Image: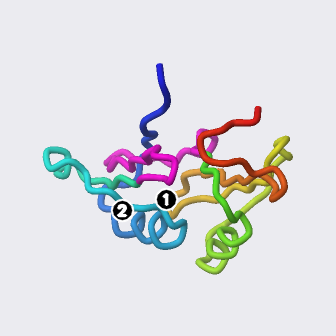
Amino acid sequence: MRRLHHVQISIPAGGESDARSFYATTVGLAEIPKPEHLRSRGGLWFRLDSGLELHLGSDIGFRPSAKAHVAIEVDDLGALRGRLEAAGVRVWEDQPLPGFDRFYAADPFGNRLEFLARPRGERTTAGTDPR
């Protein structure tokens, strides 16, 4: 096995507009087009700078993920937190995670998301993992 290609979480059917506003505009992820043959299923796809993709699948029986979550490493945790709070997004703390600063937030549908960054003096170049 080489690496993760994508992670998928669910959003409610018809929630694409709210999801696009949150994930692309507020969080800053790059939306990528879904393949033509999958577009009728609804949902959205995003690509992170690392190449990993986040797929949002449209689900008629949607229930938010309260414990399960996606963790996204960012360059400027403070700036992201500011954008989220300015947009009225609920943000909360948890126990410290060695080697990272972090917080949790909920997307517009109640899915739990973790955002984390290495402290400024501990950042590495992309593709290297000091652990």
Looking at the image, residue 6 lies above or below residue 3? below
Callout 1 secondary element: loop
Callout 2 secondary element: loop
Q: Residue most toward the bottom? A: 86
Residue 126 x %, y % = 61, 47
Mark sitting earlier along the chain (2/1): 2
Magenta stretch, residue numbers: 47-70
Could you classify mark 2 by the number of other residues whose Cα lies within 10 Å: few (under 14), some (14-19), or many (20 or more)? some
Q: Residue at x 53, y 71 (%)?
A: 26
Lateral position of residue 117 relative to residue 58, left or right? right
The Cα–Cα distance between marks 2 and 1, rounded to whole angstroms, is: 8 Å
Any mark on residue 109, and which? 1
Q: Residue at x 84, y 55 (%)?
A: 121
Q: Provide the major secondary structure of the magenta segment.
A: loop
Q: Quadrant of the C terminus?
A: top right
Residue type beneath disc 2? Gly
Could you classify mark 1 by the number of other residues whose Cα lies within 10 Å: few (under 14), some (14-19), or many (20 or more)? some
Verify CB contact (< 8 Å) between mark 2 and mark 1.
yes
Q: Residue at x 60, y 50 (%)?
A: 72
**Does the magenta-highlighted stretch encompass residue 51?**
yes
Any mark on residue 54, and which? none
What's the image's color scheme?
Answer: rainbow
Residue type beneath disc 1? Phe
Residue 30 x %, y % = 42, 62
The residue identified by callout 2 is: 15
48 vs 39, nearest the viewer: 48
33 vs 20, nearest the viewer: 33
